Amino acid sequence: MSLIDFSQFVNELATLSGQAILPFFRTAMAPENKGEGVFDPVTEADRAAEAVMRQLIKRTFPSHGIVGEEFGSEGEDAECVWVLDPIDGTRGFISGLPTWGTLIGLMRGGRPAYGMMHQPFTGERFFGDGGGSFYRGPGGERRLRARRCPTLAEATIATTSPRLFDEAQRAAYERVEAGTRLARYGTDCYAYCMVAAGHVDLVIEAGLQPYDIVALVPIIEGAGGVVTTWDGGPPAGGGAIVAAGDKRLHAAALELLNA
C-alpha cells in the first residue's frame, strides 16, 4: 500500500468518525458512567465513532487487528494493529469543551508506527510517523516541532487532573509541578499535541490505557519529543506516562517522579 493510499485511508477514518461524533457535541445527551468509584463517562458518540472506524478497517484490512476503547480487542497479535479511542477526553466533550479528540493509532510489530489526533469541531488534525509530524487545520498545513526547554523552571506542564492520580502518584507529580513555570489541567489528548506543536513542554499522567497513548507517541516523537513510562520504559502499554518536548526536561521529570 502506497503512502498516499495510507494517508487517504487514515484521513477517511478521521472524517467518518468526526461525522459520527459532531451531531452529539453540545447537545443534551445523557452520558453513561462506566467507572467504579470514579466518573468515567461514555456516550452514544463514542460508540458510533468507533463502530464506523472498525467497519472501514475490517473492510479494507481484514488481516489487521483492532484495539478499541468501546468494543474491545480482536486480532491483537497481528503484525498491524489499529488502536482507537473515538473520544479521548469524554469529560471535556460532555462539558462542551473542545479539548477532546479522536485518536487513531497503528502498531506495527508491537511498536507505535503512526498516529493521528483529529479534533473535528475545530477542524484540526495532528499526525506523525515518528520520523516527522504535521498539523493540518484552518490555517493550512505545517510541520510540528517541539520547543527546546531544558529546565523545569522554564516549562509549561499539563495533566488531565491531579485527582486522577493515586496518593503516591499525586505526591510525585506535585514534586515536578512545583518546579515548573505554569500548569494547565483538563486538556486530555490535546496537551500531547501541544507538546508536539511547541506550546506545552511536559505532560504527566497515570492510569492510561494503550488506546489513550499509542496514537500520540509517533506525533510527539516525530516532532522531536520523547514519551516513556515513569520508569523510562516503552509507553505503548499505557500506565504512568511522561511526554516531553526536550529530552533534558524529560530526564529532569523522571528524576523527580522517582525520587
Image: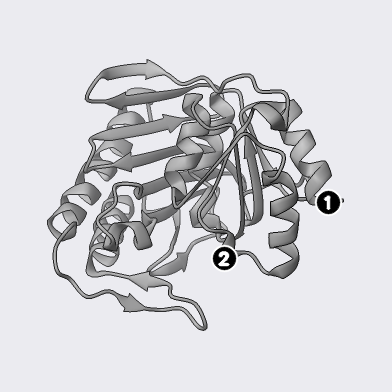
Tell me the amino acid under the disc marked 1. Asn
Q: How many marks?
A: 2
Does dot 2 land on a helix, a strand or a loop?
A: helix
Residue depicted at 26% across the width and 51% down the height: 56
Residue 168 x/y as whole percent: 75, 65
- Taking the view exactly as shown, the residue that stands out farthest to the bottom is 36
Q: Is residue 44 above or below residue 15?
A: below
Residue depicted at 45% across the width and 46% down the height: 189
Residue wearing tag 2: 163
Left or right: residue 181 compared with residue 1: right
Q: Quadrant of residue 146?
A: top right
Residue depicted at 36% across the width and 71% down the height: 41
- Taking the view exactly as shown, the residue that stands out farthest to the right is 259
Looking at the rendered image, the disc whose residue lies closer to the viewer, 2 or 1, is 2
Q: Is residue 121 above or below residue 76?
A: above
Residue wearing tag 1: 258
Residue 218 x/y as whole percent: 54, 34
Q: How is the image coloured?
A: one colour
Left or right: residue 157 compared with residue 211: right
Q: Is residue 213 above or below residue 252?
A: below
Tell me the amino acid under the disc marked 2. Arg
Sequence-wise, which precedes: disc 2 or disc 1? 2
Asked if the residue at tag 1 contacts the one at tag 2, i.e. Cβ–Cβ closer than 8 Å, the answer is: no
